[in-house]
Image (cartoon, rainbow, N blue to C red):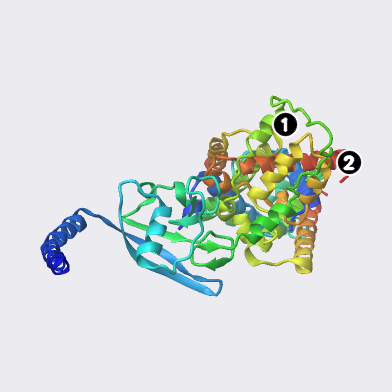
Amino acid sequence: MISIYSFLLETLTAINAAPSFTVIEAVLSASMQEMDVSVWRGDASGGGLEHFRVPAEESQTILDVVAWIQQYADPTLSYRYACRVGMCGSCAMMVNGVPRWTCRTHVKKVLKDNAITIEPLRNLPVIKDLAADMDPFFDKWVAAGGVHHPTKTRNEPIEILDPKTPERVETDTGIECINCSVCYAACDTVSSNVDFLGPAALQRAWTIYLDPKDADPNVILDAVSGKGGCHNCHSQGSCTLHCPNGLNPMKAIAGLKRATVASFFKGGR
Amino acid sequence: MIRPHRSHPLWIAYLLHRLSGLGLALFLPVHFYVLAFALNEPERLDGFLRFADNPLVKIAEFGLVFLLAVHVFGGLRLLALEFLPWSPRQKTLAASAVAAAFLVAGTFFLQAV
Amino acid sequence: MLGLRLYMAQRLSAMVMIPLTLGHIAVMIYAIQGGLSAAEILGRTKGSVVWFLFYGLFVLAVSLHASIGLRVIVHETLGLKGRGLEIFMWLSGILLLATGLRALFAVTL
């Protein structure tokens, strides 16, 4: 008896709910704006843009748009992200032809004629869709000598550094890098010269070079003086313009140029 | 059409420096070749100089002086960027280099016509 | 593609040429007043040690500077590298130096 009653009730509710649900749906879609989003799909062998209609929200980032497509339109879309708050540096993509951190880029800021184009980072091989292969970027990070060369062992007391020395003040302007590769994607010297180490790696080398705790700054100067070194930079400034953290790799590279020239005159390098 | 990531003053300054440098490098052998007429065929040098009185050639000469001036002032900016203590006023310096080049090339043009 | 040595050569030749170029432009603006003639140019330059040194240094510096600049452009836009790139740089430098010295001797000796 109870089961028949509940069946009837459910059926009635369903019949009842149907028209009102449609009404809500209609009201929603009328007030809901949709954007034209073109997303690059493909892999290392090639690909092209695919178009999606994505509902616009009041407060929405490019990463939200990509996530919406993956969750509601095409679950096979590949992309990379982790922290969603601008710390991890994994979600950078080309947005309307400009490299950006997508988790902290608001749609409102970049929407043009109600359309957005999202592509994988420039200057890097593509793994799939929006996920670029970061290996060359990190390999060059190592090649630029951005590794600490210790002067002490763990058994010695920690060296006290004065935060006010000019070297340390200069270092502070370059250490907030999140390795997002936006500068690397923005740099035209990287695209035209395969050996060029790129802005992020050279900036890292510059901050290590300035570190008074580093045992061998000359190793760094050698590493940045090779055929892909700092001397290939043309100071186009795209790295500095597009860096999401407001860093200045162009200034850091100029510092390395100055340091290598000084050591050339001093030591006949 | 300049691609979006490049549309900023310092990239334009780079482009101007590269194109002016390339233009000058291609012009120089011709310049040297004509000057060498002075050695054995002075009349050909004079013939060339008369050809240079042509108004169109004057405009081309304005272009050459502009290339030279913009490459020098742009190069001065780069040397300052690389070897002097860092200045954040790069855009202003780049614009000043172009302005100074126009001034110099304009002075040349006014004297030439 | 551009190591420290070529970079230094490029920047030092640039520094040498800055006063020379500004001087050259000033001379041009002065010289073209009232038209140019071969006799006028040669009257100024022939047998002058100062002009010989001025333009001699200019030719040396510009051959160095332009050949390194062309090396960068050819590598970055045409992708030339390795031995081919070295040969290209040296040939363009030698061409500039040879034509430049010939012009220098023609107008100053």
Q: From mark 1 to mark 2, how far is it between C-alphas?
A: 21 Å
Q: Secondary structure at mark 1?
A: helix
Instruction: Report the side of A43 relative to A269 (left or right).
Output: left
Mark 1 and mark 2 residues within 8 Å of each other at the beta carbon: no
Q: Is residue A14 above or below residue A233?
A: below
**Is residue B47 among what the camera can see?**
no
The outermost residue toward the front is A1
- List x then y, in percent, for residue A250: 63, 43
| Image mark for residue B74 | none
Comes first in the chain, label 1 or label 2: 1
- Kindly identify which residue carries mark 2: A267
A119 or A239: nearer the viewer: A119
Amino acid under disc 2? Gly
- List x then y, in percent, for residue A72: 35, 64
Amino acid under disc 1? Glu
A1 or C6: nearer the viewer: A1
The outermost residue toward the bottom is A45
Quarter of the rendering containing residue A204: top right
Total residue callouts: 2
* Chain letter of the residue carrying label 2: A
The outermost residue toward the right is A267
| Image mark for residue A167 | 1
